[in-house]
Image (cartoon, rainbow, N blue to C red):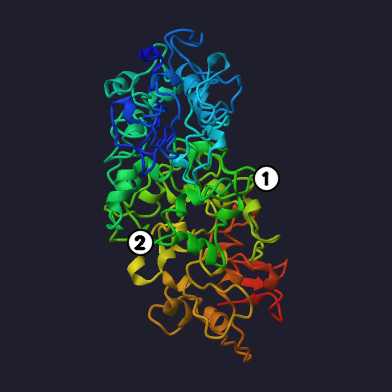
Amino acid sequence: MKKVESGIYVLLALAAAFMAVPFASAVEKPHSRDIIQTPHNLSITGGGGAHDIKSGTEAEVCIFCHAPHHASTVTPLWSREISPLTIYVTYKSPTLKANPQQPRGASRLCLSCHDGTIALGHLTGDRILDASLPAFKDMPQETDPRKNPNLGTDLSNDHPISFLYSEAGNLELHDATAVQAKGVRLSQDQYVECTSCHDAHNNQYGNFLVQDVTLQQDALCTTCHNKQGWSEPDSTHRTGGSRYDTVTAGVAASGCINCHLPHNAQRGEHLLRLSGVGAGEETNCYTSCHQNVPYSNVWSQFNTSLYTHRVQNYNGVHVDNESLPVVGGKKHVECTDCHNPHFAGAQGLPLGSSTPLVPPASAAPDINGALRGVRGVDLTGAAVVSPARYEYEVCYRCHAGPSADQYTSLAQMLPNRLFKDYDESNRFNSSNAAYHPVSADRRPGPNGRSLRSQYQSTMFRIYCNDCHDSHGTNEPHMLRYLNQDTFPATGGTNYPLCFRCHDPDYLLNPVGAPSSDTAVLHQRHVLGQHLNGDTRQTPCSVCHDPHGVPATRGALSSNAAHLVNFDVRYAGETAVYDAVARTCAVICHTSNPKSYP
């Protein structure tokens, strides 16, 4: 029987081994180029596939789709009844450049079976070949979406069809001529249809695919798709990485299919594999990989840490091309806010480590492979950087700009500062009287004297990640180490976060060599060695703001030097620090102002 005109056969851009619109199961017949040996043989000699479907009466093989006489007017020699449905729910994505139309051409023919609305034995003119052959919608549905031949009339979770390949043209698609040279056949008018990935008459590769994907399951995907970052030498999701060598080969062989499904995806947008329909986007990351052995259990860190980015709370809010910094009312965080799965790699991992998994090492403020390919916001807190170059630019996606205050977990962010500003680009601004060197180098001169000796001539920049763990910790503000901020401090507290970099002997020992000229002041406050016998200890954070003191709120070198920005819960709303006179007036003193040598 003659095939449908080949001009309507084209190759879908995203397909792979589990592109299971056709039947597929352990009982399927051996792969064959002979249609008689495929699940598309519905005659009495047929069978195989997920449901072992075959007629009990009809001996003709081709008649289920083709007829030499009295055929449908839809296309030459077409025998099947075409669904009267004219409006399908088509694929949509805010980042899609193509414009999928209602199913047309060869796709319309495929859907006469695979939208599930018409019985398999129903031919044009209401002729019934075999009443025992039901429609797909009336058959048991496979729990594995890759084996479910019933696409239904909602195609929003299937790879888009009926669009011009050139319409989707961008740097992330290979040239149409090049893909056709690899077996990709676009229609005469260059449309992508179901038949772009599937040849209904040839099942030699399984699932009626037009390419062999036995060894590389995403081979058909990458025939068309040329995702930026995918070719990076350390692209973990492409190569399988080197950290977990027991799964490297399997991850590499699955490629795109680790995260995407071309049909019946649990989330239509981006065709993501999730833990279930309606599940959060983050389940795409942890269901198969970042929760189970041998991978590090990132999901457990998110769920058991007292303080973390609650990725599970914001289902459906994140959009890949969303406005940045994140605008008011769109508070959220997802894995893909910080990580681009196509770019992500192990270069420079962990941040700042001198012995990274993959060299070269990363040094503050530069991003590493894990943060590669993500859009960010620059040090002004306003301009979008694509891609981000520095780690803080990724953090500034949310923690900079006029809506940054929506990310405070409490009605009032604690500590409650005298000079308040939730926009971190203002707090780290190099024009401030004092700041930690995140978005700008530390100032030259003596301001590095309080650092441990190994850092004085080397630590000119730090990462946000040096103090915070974005996946979660049991310390407030996702701090990596204890940094008590309540007064009086618990006896014996040694402030491991601050003293990770700063030298406690220099700051707290007035007879040390060298020592700070304010060592006596720090000794009395931090260690509780007051002259009046008061032993209450004052946390570092009561007086000092670890991010910076924002000039945008009136902080000057005369009232905010040395990161002094009082926590007004203890110092009072009217607290005053005079850096020139070296005095302060705070409610925790019995007399004010208090002068220090």
Residue nearer the viewer, 368 or 43 = 43
Residue nearer the viewer, 383 or 570 = 383
Q: Mark 2 sits on what residue?
A: 294
Q: Mark 1 sits on what residue?
A: 329
Residue extending furthest toward the bottom: 533
Residue 104 x %, y %: 50, 17
Q: Quadrant of the C terminus?
A: bottom right
Kindly check if marks 1 and 2 are in contact, taking CB atoms under 8 A apart as contact: no
Instruction: Indicate which disc, 1 or 2, sits on the residue closer to the N terminus.
Output: 2
Q: Residues within 10 Å of mark 1 (few under 14, many from 20)?
A: few
At horizontal 46% and vertical 83% (from top left) the residue drawn is 510
Residue 46 x %, y %: 38, 31
Residue 158 x %, y %: 49, 33
**In the drawing, does residue 145 fall left or right of residue 550?**
left
Query: Considering the numbered disc 2 on the image, is that residue within a helix, a strand or a loop?
Result: loop
Q: Which mark is residue 81?
A: none
Q: Quadrant of residue 462?
A: bottom left
Residue 495, compared with residue 243, is above or below; it is below
Q: Quadrant of residue 200?
A: top left
Identified by mark 2, the residue type is Pro
Identified by mark 1, the residue type is Gly
Viewer-nearest of labels 1 and 2?
A: 2
Residue 559, compared with residue 425, is above or below; it is below
Query: Considering the numbered disc 1 on the image, is that residue within a helix, a strand or a loop?
Result: loop
